[in-house]
Image (cartoon, helix red, strand yellow):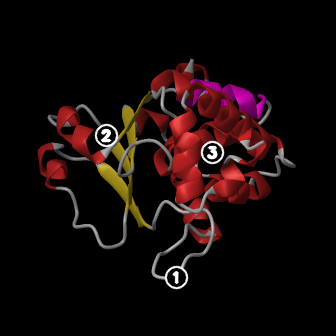
Amino acid sequence: MASDFVPFGLTVCGLSELCNFGGGKVSHVLSILDPEMTEPSDFGDYGEHERLELRFHDIIEPTRGQIAPERADVERILAFGRDLLAEPVDCRHLLVHCHAGVSRSTAALTMILAQAQPDRPAADAVAAVVAIRAQTWPNLRMTEFADDILGRRGELVAAVRQRHVTLGKQRPELVQFMIDNGRIREVEDLID
């Protein structure tokens, strides 16, 4: 399904999975790390590849002692995606990762796909990411910035919120996790 959006391969993963993609399997990496984290050593095994590295925490509200994703971060993700589409022959396979491969990375890939096919429903972009990564839970703050930048008039946010509802009903423990971690806006539709 993701191949309907872009002419190159796609992977979403977490830090513990990076070791599976060395040996030239990946030509481009979008790396989203916590600010205090050291660069993963796995990239040394990747061979020549292009990489955009961003550093912010997986939060949706400004929080003391943490760095929230900002509009400029989302603009950089979208610019990276535009560059890949402008020269698709150079991109054989894009790997997007964050700490767990669940929230920041899936938000980033969702916005890249939504940008690649602006005439397609945002829900299709979310579904394409879910097909790659079943535990997809896109970061709402990142999505809100992307929705505005891409002129989606709330459609991208609505699609991501629907994903939160769907996964939250399947895995209720995630709802409590989000509440406990200051992400109540992502689960407010699931709270009685």
What residue is shown with label 1?
64
What residue is shown with label 2?
27
Q: Going by the image, does 144 lie left or right of 129?
A: right
Query: Where does residue 165 sit, x and y in percent of width and height?
Result: 69, 34
Q: Identify which residue, 35 or 27, lies in the foreground.
A: 35
**Mainly helix, strand or loop, the magenta region?**
helix
Q: Is residue 133 magenta?
A: no
Of mark 2 and mark 3, the one earlier in the sequence is: 2
Q: Which residues are magenta?
A: 120-129
Q: Is residue 123 magenta?
A: yes
Q: Are marks 2 and 3 in contact (CB under 8 Å)?
A: no
User: Mark 2 belongs to which amino acid?
Assistant: Ser
The residue at the point 58 percent across, 63 percent down is 182
**Quarter residue 137 falls in:** top right
Q: Identify which residue, 114 or 104, lies in the foreground.
A: 104
Q: Could you say whether the residue bearing mark 1 is in a helix, strand or loop?
A: loop
Task: Please rate how many residues cluster around mark 3, counting C-alpha atoms within 10 Å: few if below 14, some from 14 to 19, many from 20.
Answer: many
Q: Identify which residue, 146 or 51, lies in the foreground.
A: 146
Q: Quadrant of the C terminus?
A: top right
User: Mark 1 belongs to which amino acid?
Assistant: Arg
What residue is shown with label 3?
111
User: Mark 3 belongs to which amino acid?
Assistant: Met
Of mark 1 and mark 3, the one earlier in the sequence is: 1
Tell which tag, 1 or 2, sits nearer the viewer.
1
Q: Could you say whether the residue bearing mark 3 is in a helix, strand or loop?
A: helix
Residue 6 visible, this orientation: no
Tell which tag, 1 or 3, sits nearer the viewer.
1
Query: Where does residue 154 sit, x and y in percent of width and height?
Result: 84, 47
The residue at the point 16 percent across, 48 percent down is 42
